[in-house]
Amino acid sequence: MIYPWQHQVWDGLQRRLVSLPHALLIQGPQGVGKLALAEHLAQSLLCEAEDRRKAPCGACDGCRWFLAGSHPDFRRVEPEALARRLAVGDDEEAPAEGPASTRKPSNEIRIEQVRGLDGFLNHQSHRGGRRVALVHPAEAMNVHAANALLKSLEEPPGSAAFILVSHRAARLAATIRSRCVTVPVGIPPLESARDWLAGEKISEPERWLAYASGAPLKALADAQDAGPVIASLRQALQGRDLEALGAVNDREGLEALAEALQKYALDRAFASFSGRGKYGAAKPSEHGLAWLRFAREMGRSRQLARHPLNPRLFAGEMLAGMPED
């Protein structure tokens, strides 16, 4: 599946399916559907329809296996923690039973995962076509994993196809970027994103898009998941009432709160300097620099919120650090 704003990018890729380069880097901001585009491309490469203009057909054995998550010529490489959250990790990457399974899932792509592609890519494909490896997000590779992947990119097996997905391509080694053909996926036009969100039954789509800096999937997630936190934040800001932050009781709630506070602070700062907030909700303030400093502090808090903390205590500390006006 691709999103409405991706049709132009997809048309360009589909025209080149037969002669597609061995390595692509799909890059752009988070929340614009890069992973969906990468999966659609992978399915197309594995589709067995005779007319490549119709790939992916959705009806052949290759498409059915891919959609079921069991295609023998496809591998997904991603951090174990992400695979667990998305419930897409295959059996080969699942943690072993017993004491070893108690370790914390890694947020990195490890060298063992990349090396595990060697045997897969160097053997003949099960269906006589290409073998496809999807690496997501590519910037999650640690140094050793990146070096291992670089060797495969430098000497790719004949039928191998690498699809790298990155939210922050600048973090990738230049040597890896140089061996990939870049496919940029940017923020879609406001009208397209707004209409799609409206189709998803999201009220005030333009407000959520502003809050998500124009990224429609981020706007959808915020509207569905962060709505209670943001509603609690608005109530709390009116009277600095910690009890109003009842929705902040876990790590996800803390992250959403820190992000909301950061954007609120930036809005107050922008409104102070220009008379209009970026996110459309803030009133002017006489303490623009103080709000900028608080926004910077909330950026650090977003990182800290990913670690085990007392949610209520941490939320109170964040709220207490706000400027007084």
Image (cartoon, grey):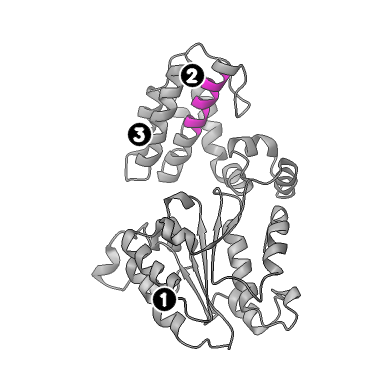
Camera-near label (3 vs 2) is: 3
Q: Quadrant of residue 111?
A: bottom left
Q: Which residue is mark 3?
A: 314
Q: Which residues are magenta?
A: 260-271
Q: Main secondary structure of the magenta part?
A: helix
Q: Which residue is mark 2?
A: 239
Of labels 2 and 1, earlier in sequence is 1
Residue 262 is one of the magenta-drawn residues: yes
| Contact flag, marks 3 and 2 (Cβ < 8 Å) | no
Separation of residues labelled 1 and 3 (CA atoms): 42 Å
Q: Quadrant of the N terminus?
A: bottom right
- Mark 3 residue type: Phe
Residue visible at 55% across and 38% down in the picture: 228
Measured along the vertical axis of the image, is residue 70 above or below residue 193? Answer: below
Residue 1 is one of the magenta-drawn residues: no
- Mark 1 residue type: Leu
| Contact flag, marks 2 and 1 (Cβ < 8 Å) | no
Camera-near label (1 vs 3) is: 1
Separation of residues labelled 3 and 2 (CA atoms): 18 Å
Measured along the vertical axis of the image, is residue 307 above or below residue 257? Answer: below
Q: Secondary structure at mark 2?
A: helix
Q: Is residue 299 left or right of residue 38?
A: left
Task: Point out residue 154 in the picture as x, y percentages from the top left corner.
Answer: 43, 71
Residue visible at 69% across and 56% down in the picture: 6
Q: What mark, if any, has residue 117 been given in the picture? A: 1
Of labels 1 and 3, earlier in sequence is 1
